[in-house]
Image (cartoon, rainbow, N blue to C red):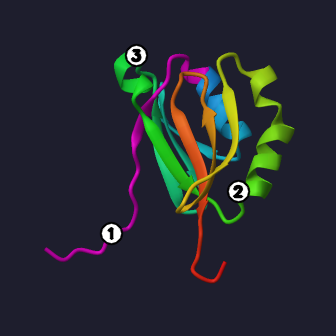
């Protein structure tokens, strides 16, 4: 089967849709409201759907990996946003080094775990 993929957009839930929407706008995503309680969030050509739906087991087991150019710079930008003091339940975990690259972590207001990472290249 040969098809040219254009994008992939996961669906994620929110315990408090308005709070999560604000959180993702603060992270730099642009919100495109599709209907009440359902929005597309984009950054450049990447995106995901946020919906006003909360199933604890689903949310607690949702992880998203976003590859970034410079995880150190991204971490510093995250820290400057003051997300932990602005949003209850948000947790930030500093950069960890793995055999494949480096990553830091953010739990959103609902508990979804985001990995922000960069892969090592052969020339590093």
> Closest to the observer: 109 or 45?
109
Q: Is residue 2 left or right of residue 123?
A: left
List the residue tagged with mark 1.
5
Q: Which mark is residue 72?
A: none
How many C-alpha atoms fall within 10 Å of the one at disc 1: few (<14), some, or many (≥20)? few
Q: Residue at x 57, y 51 (%)?
A: 42
Report if the CB atoms under discs 3 and 1 are less than 8 Å apart. Answer: no
Number of on-image labels: 3
Q: Which residues are magenta?
A: 1-18
List the residue tagged with mark 3.
56
Q: Position of residue 105 (x, y in %)?
A: 62, 40
**Counting residues from the N terminus, which is met first, the one under dot 3 or under dot 1?**
1
Secondary structure beneath dot 2 equals helix
Q: Residue at x 77, y 42 (%)?
A: 78
As measured in the structure, the alpha-carbon distance from the residue carrying label 2 to the one carrying label 1 is 27 Å
One can see residue 79 in this view: yes
Secondary structure beneath dot 3 equals helix
Task: Say above or below: 101 vs 80.
Answer: below
How many C-alpha atoms fall within 10 Å of the one at disc 2: few (<14), some, or many (≥20)? some
Select label 2 or label 1 by which is in front. Answer: 2
List the residue tagged with mark 2.
71
Task: Say above or below: 92 vs 76.
Answer: above
Q: Position of residue 102 (x, y in %)?
A: 63, 56
Q: Magenta region's main secondary structure?
A: loop
């Amino acid at each position: 089967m040969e098809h040219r993929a254009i994008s992939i957009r996961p669906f994620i839930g929110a315990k408090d849709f308005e709070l999560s929407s604000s959180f993702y706008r603060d992270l730099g995503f642009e919100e495109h409201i599709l209907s009440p309680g359902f929005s597309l969030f984009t950054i450049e050509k990447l995106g995901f759907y946020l919906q006003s739906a909360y199933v604890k087991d689903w949310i607690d087991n949702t992880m998203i990996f976003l590859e970034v150019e410079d995880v150190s710079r991204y971490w510093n930008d995250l820290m400057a946003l003051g997300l932990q003091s602005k949003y209850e339940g948000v947790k930030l975990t500093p950069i960890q080094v793995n055999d494949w690259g480096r990553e830091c972590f953010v739990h959103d207001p609902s508990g979804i775990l985001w990995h922000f990472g960069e892969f090592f290249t052969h020339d590093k």
